[in-house]
Amino acid sequence: MATRTRTAKRRSASVIISRELAAIAQAWRDHRRLVMRLFDPATDPDDIPALRRYLGRTEWFARREVTQRIYEAVRDAELIWPREIARVAMAAKDVPDIDKMVVRDIISRFTKHLPNRMVLNGK
């Protein structure tokens, strides 16, 4: 009986803490918006991009999807090049070839990823 009440108290305390943390985060967002409007009323904070770009993340491939595609390609073919795997993956995802930077980024992910994974796994 005492264990249930302790668990229930902990659960209710964690709910209260998470609500308070969310309220504090919202207060900081509101404060930043107000300060920005104070200095420039025409500023929309949502139009300002983030300062830090997270390297290693891409909007085209999910987590571990590059590794999965590499393993599938190595299993299916005897001789494979990372650039070929990247081109096939881009075609499967309908990635446009218009932007050269995006194409270069995706190909470099496959190129950097293939030797490391194959060496670690002894292939």
Image (cartoon, rainbow, N blue to C red):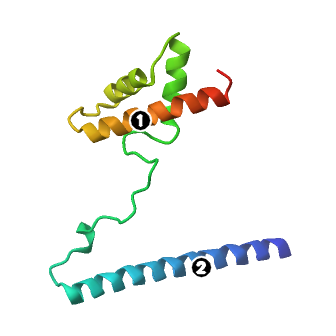
30, 70: nearer the viewer: 70
Task: Please state which of the two labelled residues, at mark 1 or mark 2, is closer to the viewer.
Answer: 1
Q: Decide: is 54 above or below 61.
A: below
Give the mark nearest the N terminus, 1 or 2: 2
Position of residue 39 in the picture relative to residue 52 (left or right) = left
What residue did someone put label 1 on? 108
Image location (x, y in percent) of residue 113: 52, 34
| Residue at 78% over, 76% down | 6
Q: Amino acid at mark 1?
A: Ser
Q: Is residue 1 in view from this perspective?
A: no
Q: Are marks 1 and 2 in contact (CB under 8 Å)?
A: no
Which label was assigned to residue 17? 2
Expressed as whole percent of the image width and height from the top left, the position of residue 13 reads 66, 79
For the residues labelled 1 and 2, the Cα–Cα distance comes to 43 Å
Q: What is the crowding at mark 2: few (fewer than 14 residues within 10 Å), some, or many (at least 20)?
A: few
Q: Amino acid at mark 2?
A: Ile
Question: Residue 88's image quarter?
Answer: top left
Q: Circle 1: is it few (<14), some (14-19), or many (20+) Cα within 10 Å?
A: some
Q: Residue furthest left?
A: 42
- Residue 118: x and y, percent? 60, 26
* Residue under the point 45% across and 24% down: 82
